[in-house]
Image (tube, rainbow, N blue to C red):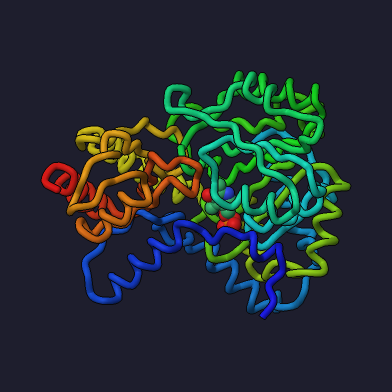
Amino acid sequence: MKLALRAQGINPSPTLAIDAKAKQMIKDGLDIIGFGAGEPDFDTPEVIKDEAIAALKRGDTKYTPASGSVSLKEAVCFKMQRDHGLEYKPNQVVICCGAKHALYNLFQVICDPGDEVIIPAPYWVSYSEQVALAGAKPVFIPTHEAGCFKMTAEQLRSAITGKTVALILNSPSNPTGAVYSRQELEAIAAIAVEKNIIVVSDEIYEQLIYEGEHVSIATINPQIKDLTIIINGVSKTFAMTGWRIGYAVGDAKVIKAMGDLQSHSTSNPTTFCQAASVLALKNPPQEKITAMVSEFKRRREYMVDTVNKIPGLSCLKPAGAFYVFASIKGIIGKEYFGRKVSDADGFAELLLEHAKVAVVPGNGFGAPEYIRLSYATSFEKIEKGLSRIAEFVTEG
Ligand SMILES: *Cc1c(COP(=O)(O)O)cnc(C)c1O
């Protein structure tokens, strides 16, 4: 059957191949430790579940407006004011089926063929694919461990061309855990304002932060606020990945276009999930979030210390999110079981086969000399998995 050019150009998620293999091995009864989790290993807080059940019982089972319910848009405005001191009107909010969907809709409405979107690398895999699906060209700015995986304002300035429409900022970052300071954001904002480019600020990990504080670039000044589209959602903060509620906030014209696009594709996100998200944003179960963050922090300390003791591996201490992004530069070129490791893909395959540990190779994030280890898994599994990796690299 014919496939459109657009479809032919999609790179399937590179992490899926190894994930599929790991799942098959588990199914076959093998004891695999997985470091691949991209979601909290905590359950959604009970009060939020109860609110969804109550919503179902009171009949929140029909369509809401395609761009989301008025009450959830108001709750997002309330949250923006409470957490960031940012003022928005409900017509500046669109509710989507997850933050990923909000990003997809956004690129569809701001990108024309030939436009360029700047993405600091290492980057979350879907950014580049979504930009390409909108017909635009991803332009990568390399960042390095020495600079804590953060783009500098000078790098941004030299990447901007006459075709640049937007910059994607993801702080705290998946996969590196990097968190931009207010000062760094000020320098970036000054350039974005001068060059009049849109800042797509993916703030999905804003609450999962262990050092420093989360600053939304929209808070720097009114000019940058007008150029920023904030992307966020309930998935990570409230352990609600399966509920599929995310949102975008910003320029009313762009937001309306996203809603119009959505009105011809998914229509509204699930009605009773929107109702429960109102509660999550207005009355967050703060003690549950605090407990989750402190457990992530405990695992992070252990993981960073342990990874840095494994010969050939090293990592920075991530300031946010729930991933350790470890360099395997000391492993590349070595031979294990008759196979020479040339990049993270190869190393991940060897680890899965011989150490029974699943890690995410950095190739898909634009970082083939790194692996991503998620600590959204139990402390015991982290201990066991890391000792298997240590054993593998020392004994082969
Ligand atoms: C998890 C994640 C998202 C999207 O989450 P949704 O479940 O679609 O709301 C967006 N950006 C990054 C960087 C993520 O890691």
371 or 135, which lies in front? 135
The answer to whether residue 237 is above or below residue 87 is below
Q: Is residue 55 left or right of residue 241?
A: right
Q: Is residue 361 left or right of residue 165?
A: left
Instruction: Tell me residue 65's x, y (percent).
Output: 82, 66
Q: Is residue 201 left or right of residue 332?
A: right
Q: Residue at the spot x=20%, y=58% of the render?
A: 354
Instruction: Tell me residue 292's x, y (percent).
Output: 41, 48
278 or 203, which lies in front? 203
Q: Is residue 69 left or right of residue 356?
A: right
- Residue 38, picture quadrant: bottom left
384 or 293, which lies in front? 384
The answer to whether residue 85 is above or below residue 61 is above
The answer to whether residue 341 is above or below residue 304 is below
- Residue 296, picture quadrant: top left
Instruction: Tell me residue 28's x, y (percent).
Output: 26, 76
**Residue situated furthest left in the rendering:** 395
The answer to whether residue 236 is above or below residue 19 is above
Q: Is residue 269 visible in this depiction of the protein?
A: yes
Q: Quadrant of the N terminus?
A: bottom right
Q: Is residue 73 visible in this depiction of the protein?
A: no
